[in-house]
Image: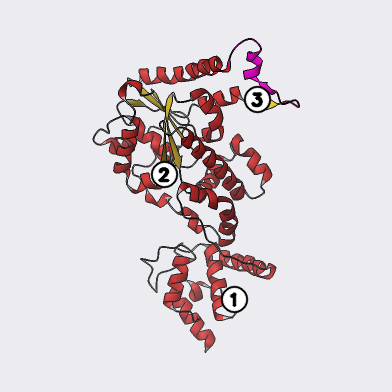
């Protein structure tokens, strides 16, 4: 499966039980408190499992993971 | 609805701690006929008074048989105990210029069978249930803030090393006892779901008043929520709020998935019995993944500073 905005929103809603009605692609996820540490870990593991990759500790940054746009951009750059 | 002539003076709210029982007491206390003191602990004390321990030959060693040897029948004992405890509450209601009283003490849910022994059907009971995992989350917060566990939770804490697991078992036991009680007293006990009260307070209060044989005066909720005087032992947090907040529902959804999976096995049957959807959590973790999750968590903490 490829990670897309819809895939992430579905994951937030169905697995993390987050109300996604107000979540846009540039909504801050972790720094805003919308997703807490426990669920951020779950999200990273979900990305790893879906993309068959490992997110390395130096890559765990707000620049890479703090919004849907940033996640998609991070994964795009890694794939390039 | 209870007929006016046989309407009991006492209203007793029962429910696992952190189920919204204080909010309910606050609402009822705004009624012009109902006095609502702080938590008296009188009912659980009465239940403990009647408690006993079995001896090796099956004899129950306690006050019932102790006084029984003096010729005091259990019926007389429980009547005198009821009159003794209800007397304080009747006096309080009279001093407040009201005809009825509502009693609610958080830990009563762990003494239901004892309370039933001496209260019987001489009171009306509101049996409050709330989603078990919201209760568990709130119990954890409550114990952290108070810096202690109530004695009713000690056995659970001793048995389970993880507090959330201990609280989940406590909720299951208290809630099933409560639902059993409500089923045994269909005319005198009304099941109350916290989420239903929160979702539509005006309508729900009308239903409650109908069960209690009272009429809801106009503005009852506004009066209740404007009263910030907690009176005696109470959940001060509830009294600091001037509105009914829906954010108290579904707080459990923020728990880690591994935790949810473990708790689901404990609470699912009881959740269903209460009318909630059981949790369906699929989560598998290897040691390696668990280690990576921990390392990832450490890295995430550094992003917060």
Residue drawn at 65 percent across, 18 percent down: B65
Query: Where on the picture, by quarter, is residue B104?
Result: top left
Q: Is residue B305 visible?
A: no
**Residue density around tag 3, few if under 14, some if 14–19, many if 20 or more, within 10 Å:** some
Asked if marks 2 and 1 fall on the same chain, the answer is no
In the picture, the disc for residue B122 is none
Query: Where on the picture, by quarter, is residue A13?
Result: bottom left
Residue B71 lies in the magenta-colored region: yes
In the picture, the disc for residue B193 is 2
In the picture, the disc for residue B52 is 3
Q: Quadrant of the N terminus of chain B?
A: top left
Q: Secondary structure at mark 1?
A: helix
In which chain is the residue bearing label 2? B
Boundaries of the magenta span: B55-73
Q: Which of the two discs, 2 and 1, sits closer to the camera?
A: 2
Residue A5 lies in the magenta-colored region: no
Q: Position of residue B10 (x, y in %)?
A: 41, 25
Q: Residue furthest bottom?
A: A80
Q: Is residue B131 left or right of residue B300?
A: left
Q: Position of residue B295 (x, y in %)?
A: 64, 68
Residue drawn at 68 percent across, 44 percent down: B159
Q: Quadrant of the C terminus of chain B?
A: bottom right
In which chain is the residue bearing label 3? B
**Residue density around tag 1, few if under 14, some if 14–19, many if 20 or more, within 10 Å:** few
In this view of the protein, which residue sits in the foreground, B94 or A24?
B94
Residues at marks 2 and 1 touching, judged by CB atoms closer than 8 Å: no
Find disc 1 in the rendering and name its residue. A58
Q: Secondary structure at mark 2?
A: strand
């Amino acid at each position: 499966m490829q990670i897309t905005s819809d895939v992430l929103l579905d994951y937030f809603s169905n697995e993390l039980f987050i109300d996604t009605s107000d979540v846009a692609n540039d909504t801050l996820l972790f720094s805003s408190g919308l997703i807490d540490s426990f669920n951020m870990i779950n999200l990273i593991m979900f990305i790893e499992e879906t993309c068959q990759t490992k997110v390395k500790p130096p890559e765990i940054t707000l620049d890479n993971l703090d919004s849907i746009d940033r996640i998609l951009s991070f994964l795009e750059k890694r794939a390039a | 609805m209870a007929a006016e002539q046989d309407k009991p003076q006492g209203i007793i709210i029962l429910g696992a701690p952190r189920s919204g029982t204080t909010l309910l007491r606050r609402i009822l206390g705004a009624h012009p006929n109902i006095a609502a003191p702080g938590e008296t602990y009188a009912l659980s004390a009465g239940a403990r008074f009647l408690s006993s321990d079995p001896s090796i030959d099956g004899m129950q060693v306690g006050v019932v048989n102790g006084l029984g040897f003096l010729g005091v029948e259990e019926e007389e004992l429980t009547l005198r105990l009821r009159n003794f405890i209800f007397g304080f509450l009747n006096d309080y209601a009279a001093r407040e210029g009201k005809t009825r009283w509502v009693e609610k003490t958080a830990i009563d849910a762990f003494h239901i069978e004892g309370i039933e022994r001496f209260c019987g059907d001489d009171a009306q009971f509101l049996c409050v249930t709330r989603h078990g995992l919201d209760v568990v989350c709130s119990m954890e917060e409550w114990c952290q803030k108070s810096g202690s566990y109530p004695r009713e939770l000690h056995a659970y804490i001793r048995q389970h090393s993880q507090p959330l697991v201990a609280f989940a078992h406590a909720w299951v036991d208290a809630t099933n006892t409560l639902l059993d009680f409500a089923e045994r007293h269909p005319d005198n006990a009304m099941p109350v779901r916290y989420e239903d009260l929160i979702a539509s307070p005006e309508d729900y209060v009308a239903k409650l008043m109908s069960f209690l044989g009272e009429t809801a005066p106009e503005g009852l909720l506004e009066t209740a929520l404007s009263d910030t005087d907690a009176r005696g032992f109470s959940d001060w947090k509830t009294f600091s709020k001037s509105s009914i907040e829906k954010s108290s529902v579904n707080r459990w959804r923020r728990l880690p998935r591994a935790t949810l999976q473990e708790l689901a096995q404990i609470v699912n049957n009881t959740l269903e019995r209460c009318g909630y959807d059981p949790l369906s959590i699929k989560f598998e973790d290897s040691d390696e993944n668990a280690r990576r999750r921990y390392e990832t968590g450490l890295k995430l903490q550094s992003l917060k500073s």
